[in-house]
Image (cartoon, rainbow, N blue to C red):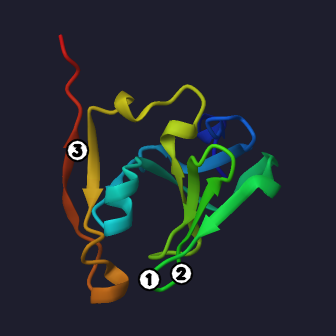
């Protein structure tokens, strides 16, 4: 069970979807992915275990999208279009949660974000997940 420090609340842009989440490793699991879909989406995510997300409001306005193998399920608010979270393909016992939806958290709070190699996904290659690089944010002075 996540500690109180790992409990976060969040919402989509319009506020129709509100949720709480128990982050498995707090904000230490921050990451991005290089797969075609994640490159287009551009989200920075953190990890929660299955059952760790509690939709408090707006479950009926959440819509989902699946592609390629259909294993990963990506959730969006059908009103404002914001991606809130997805069930991971590589480990379906985990969810990735959009940090930009978490109250008081911004993707720009992290000077470095590990980027995982989703182009060569472990489910396709059978090899361990590889780190592809690091995304850096350097604030202007």
With 46 as the anchor, is 114 left or right in this view? left
Marks 2 and 3: in contact by CB < 8 Å?
no
Q: Residue 21: where, in percent of width, then height? A: 66, 47
With 72 as the anchor, is 110 left or right in this view? left
Viewer-nearest residue: 121 or 78: 78
Marks 1 and 2: in contact by CB < 8 Å?
yes
Q: Does dot 3 land on a helix, a strand or a loop?
A: strand
Which residue is at a point 63% across and 66% down the rendered structure image? 64
Q: Residue 43: where, in percent of width, then height? A: 41, 49
Q: CA distance from mark 3 to mark 2?
A: 26 Å
With 134 as the anchor, is 21 left or right in this view? right
Residue 26 visible somewhere in the drawing: yes
Which residue is at a point 27% across and 51% down the rendered structure image? 114
> Can you tell which quarter of the image residue 122 is in?
bottom left
Which residue has dot 2 on it? 71
Viewer-nearest residue: 23 or 44: 44
- Mark 3 or mark 1, which is nearer the start of the sequence? 1
The label number, if any, that marks residue 135 in the structure image: 3
Q: Residue 32: where, in percent of width, then height? A: 34, 54
């Amino acid at each position: 069970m996540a500690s109180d420090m790992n409990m976060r609340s969040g919402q989509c842009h319009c506020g129709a979807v509100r949720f709480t989440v128990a982050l498995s490793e707090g904000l230490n699991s921050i990451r991005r992915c290089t797969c075609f879909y994640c490159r287009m989406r551009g989200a920075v995510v953190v990890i929660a275990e299955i059952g760790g997300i509690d939709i408090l409001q707006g479950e009926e306005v959440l819509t989902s999208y699946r592609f390629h193998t259909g294993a990963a399920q990506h959730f969006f608010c059908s009103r404002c279009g914001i991606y809130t979270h997805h069930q991971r393909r590589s480990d379906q016992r985990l969810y990735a949660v959009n940090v930009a939806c978490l109250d008081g958290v911004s993707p720009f709070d992290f000077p470095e974000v590990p980027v995982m190699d989703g182009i060569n996904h472990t489910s396709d290659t059978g090899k361990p997940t590889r780190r592809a690089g690091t995304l850096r944010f350097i604030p202007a002075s």
